[in-house]
Amino acid sequence: MEFKQKGESIRGKYQVLSAFPFVEGVLYFAALTDPDQADSSTPSTRFIHALKLKKQMDELDLKELLNRNEDIFFPVEEVFVEEGILYQVFEKMEGNLLGIYLLQSAPLSLVETADILKKITTHLMNCYDRGQFALVDPQNIVITKAGQIRFLYGGPKKLLSYEYPEAEDVKKVGSLLYTMLTKKHADEQTGQIEPLRQERQDVPLELEGLLMRALSPDPMKRPRTQDFWRWALRYEERESAALEEKAKSAPAISPPAKEQVKAKKPLRGEQPSASQSGSKRPVKLILGTVAALALVVYLISQLFSDSVDPALAGILDPSVEQDEEQALQYFEASNQAYEQKKLNEAVVLARKALSANPEQPEYYLHLANLFGAARDYTNGKKTLEAAVNKFPQTAKFYDALSIFAYYLKDYGTAKQAIEQAIQLDGKQALYYYHQGKILAALKQNDKAMESLRQAVKLEPDQARFNHDFALYLFRTGNLEEAIEAAKKAADSAKEDQEVYYLDLAILYFKKIERIANDPAITPEQKSKTLDPLVKEERLAIDKALKINSYYGKAYYCLSVINYYGNRLISANVAALKAVKINPKNHFYQYQLGLTYMALKKKEEAIQAFEQAVELEPNNFRYKKALAKAQVMGSKP
């Protein structure tokens, strides 16, 4: 099929400005020259898809193409045939190619990947039910401003002579999935890829298996489209159910909140819904690679004329125009979506808010918080790097950046960022606390302890600060001071109090162990000193179990303490309770075995050690204990 050249006319009312090889046929960028159509309210340019027909079409066929499902396909405003070429004139494109995001930000998080995968496979299955097709290629997909995914080329199979089976769609889905996860591309001929685990250790085994099967050269071994859809749906359901827990495990930054910004009116038009940006693999062009890339870049620039701040590449949504009022509406909608545990939608809306008003500082932190909730620390870090560039005197941005860098194990960046935060505002206890965690990761324990000491000095009643301070004091040999800090943490804690009391008990145990093994202390002195410590130790454990009677770790520690105190029956009873609460914990099973062995109960000891070995088959200590139990009572 020959291209029309720049300046040539299509049907007498579209003047070609540019022509691009497309996944099928040619895509023209054309100016609307018909005076009757070029009124002030109608955009003056259009994209037009041209495809050489294999068979004739009548008016009914053209009408069917014009009325194709707009939930799946990008709307067309005109369809006609000229000299054996089918032309489809798209409505003014307002959206984003499924490719820009990957060019800027791949690899994508699992949350984003699942969202895109579910939308694409849903469309494919709807097409199968209607005798239609949609070609899976990032060059062929648009993400609308409302967050919906639309295919450009596609429609009724019988009209467009599309003959590829579902297995070919699955292979294309697999190739796209691999690119989203790794930013690399499967071999188009063989489907070969580099080992996925080398690139993404967080990919679930089920998804990895689907991907490998999808790229198999044998179509019979490939999964069904619905298998990808089912995985994505289950993953999103699990993520939604665990949203609150994830928000707690995000970097030590408060979850997104309505930050003193109130919406004045609803969003204009359709409220944006959940969708993440997509991805794009190399376009199959007749031209050479360099020329092809140039064309793709040009096409993208024509489609999306909004400029993108390089510091926020892949974060801002190029389809969103800057508008302070609209940004406010996106921000409020994002908060509402988060409260409804719709994390994907909240992220999309937060991106739109920042895109519409990158001058609002709180939008940066809000978006970063959401990335943290989704455990997408890479994009969170990028957002905060842009924030500190734009607002270099705002300490909280440096603090947040330090935590995202910490989670990515970029300790150098984390250290520099937290030092800058403290330089800007040295009265924030939280900043010193974060600095302590970062310095500890750098193995600078003495400095870490001093940072935590400063955090405790500024906020002496903060349980978390006192607790972590106690642990670092213990690591540096300051056991007495560690116990005092741990007491403050446990007594003042409003959450995780049972954990803090148990850690206090462990510190008492360490002190008891140290005194008991000190040869310079006489037995009389040991007895006098140890009795009150043993009482404090037991009191701390009792408090932990009173708060949470199903706290298996507390029973396990109680068993260990009683075992080393030669209170064997009590040790056995506590170990049994721990195992009852969690029989799959190998530590508990091993401790139970030790108590049975000490009580000379051979069969029970063997059974407990066998469970420990089964749960942790490579643990030499467990195997040794099992072997020792098996020969109990045997004569030499």
Image: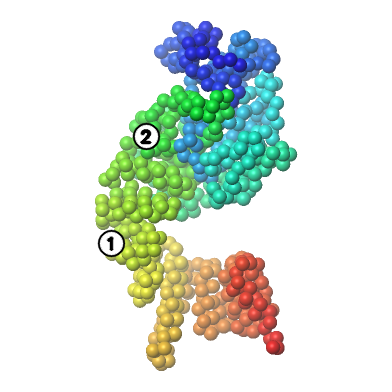
Contact between marks 1 and 2 (CB within 8 A): the answer is no
Q: Residue at image x 28%, y 54%?
A: 422
Q: Nearer the viewer, residue 473 or 302?
A: 302
Q: Position of residue 146 (x, y in %)?
A: 49, 31
Element under label 2? loop
Horizontally, residue 154 falls left or right of residue 265, namely right
Q: Residue at image x 69%, y 35%?
A: 167
Image quadrant assignment for residue 584: bottom right
Residue 345 position (above or below residue 588):
above
Label whose residue precedes the other's in the sequence (1 or 2): 2
Q: Name the residue under label 1.
A: 458
Horizontally, residue 8 falls left or right of residue 321, namely right
Distance from label 1 to label 2 (Cα)? Answer: 39 Å
How many marks do you count on the picture? 2
Q: Nearer the viewer, residue 207 or 463?
A: 207
**Which label sits in the foreground, 1 or 2?**
2
Horizontally, residue 53 falls left or right of residue 412, namely right
**Disc number for residue 380:** none
Q: Position of residue 234 (x, y in %)?
A: 60, 45
Q: Where is residue 284 in the image (x, y as percent from the top left)?
A: 58, 28
- Quarter of the image that includes the N terminus: top right
Image quadrant assignment for residue 587: bottom right
Image quadrant assignment for residue 159: top right
Q: Which amino acid does label 1 sit on?
A: Leu
Q: Which of 633 and 58 is in front in this view?
A: 633
Element under label 1? helix
Q: Mark 2 points at which residue?
A: 309
